[in-house]
Amino acid sequence: MNIKTNVFLLLLLFFTNEQKLLAQETLTRIAFGSCAKQDKPQPIWASIIEKNPQLFLFLGDNIYGDTEDMVLLKKKWEMLGEQPGYVELKKKTKILATWDDHDYGGNDAGADYPKKKESQQLFLDFFGVAKDSPRRTQEGVYHSEIIGKPGQRIQIILLDTRYFRSPLKKGYKPGEPGEGYRGKYAPNQDPNSTVLGNSQWAWLEKVLSQPSEIRLLCSSVQAIPDEHGSEMWGNFPSEREKLFKLISKTNANGLVILSGDRHLAEIMKMPAKSFGINYPIYEITSSSLNTPSGNFSKAGTRFSNEINSYRLGLTYFDTNFGMIEIDWSSDLPILRFQVCDEKGGVVLQQKLNLKDLK
């Protein structure tokens, strides 16, 4: 056995052990966010780094690519990779990601985007996904992994709501002022329409059946709301129902939804017993990392109204990121789901006991 072979085996052993150690690490601080324009300053990374997260979840619109030119799309990914704050985050924190429409390749794009195979490889390249990963050969960037030892396991489920998604239906007609004024899409009632596609649905049922104390279901678009006209699972009512019924069917305890896309932040709660789920489902939307909502920049207010029967508290429109803090020190672990402003201050929070999610 020559020196080169020995070096290779040692490196292989090192990285294998490193992955095992990561899988056993107890997570207590997780950050998340979405919507980062790569050609604009991104000062928010400094506040995220200051929170010292062990994991950062990128929920989509990680860049604004919006092109079918893969050379140009690659350059836009490189612009994010050169952002000083993001460079520093990569040195300190594990990053997991899914995509939304703009980093997928086109505004509101779905299964009809012609360069999705090529775009998928650029996405995986940027986030350093191994060449032998199943994500290199499967259709779509969906992924799941469990981090932590039994009793403190956190399952990260990253959905792909783009690769297989059926066409959106236009024609949303808002009612009274404030009812869904931000959108343009009506519910697609076609029973054959899909958000995840058959293969991803089958995969999701398997991963939801795996044992874990906490599950973070990451969806680039909102899952619980169904009253506005922007992109959301509510654009496909049968698929939204299928998602929540699958959570019930698999007895997937400890599940919380994280989402982005909207250029606003809010915390929502779907009551227990909805779709047969024995506990309430919470969703935390965090967006945008560096591009405030038009409502904030034009109206000069950080809070505004949009009808959402599931919302807890207010909607926040300035730049923001999400934080999850978990205290495992007692028999009843405490979870804090937060939305933080650009300086790191907490502007929205939901405190839960893990028993509330069973």
Image: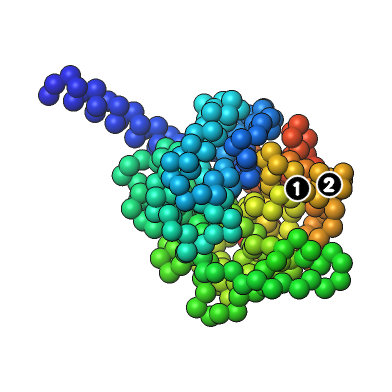
The spot of residue 3 in percent (x, y) is 17, 19
The spot of residue 25 in percent (x, y) is 50, 37
The answer to whether residue 349 is seen in the rendering is no
Q: Indicate left or right for 343 with 201 as reference.
A: right
Please state which amino acid type lies under the numbered disc 2: Lys
The spot of residue 49 in percent (x, y) is 63, 29
The answer to whether residue 129 is seen in the rendering is yes
Residue 183 sits in which quadrant? Answer: bottom right
For residue 293, the mark is 1
Looking at the rendered image, the disc whose residue lies closer to the viewer, 1 or 2, is 2
Work out which residue is located at the far top of the displayed protein and give it: 3
Which residue is rendered at x = 40% and y = 32% of the image?
Answer: 18
Which of these two is toward me, 259 or 164?
Answer: 164
Q: Indicate left or right for 185 with 148 as reference.
A: right
User: Which residue in the protein does label 2 denote?
Assistant: 298
Please state which amino acid type lies under the numbered disc 1: Ser
Q: How many labels does the image show?
A: 2
Which residue is rendered at x = 54% and y = 33% of the image?
Answer: 79
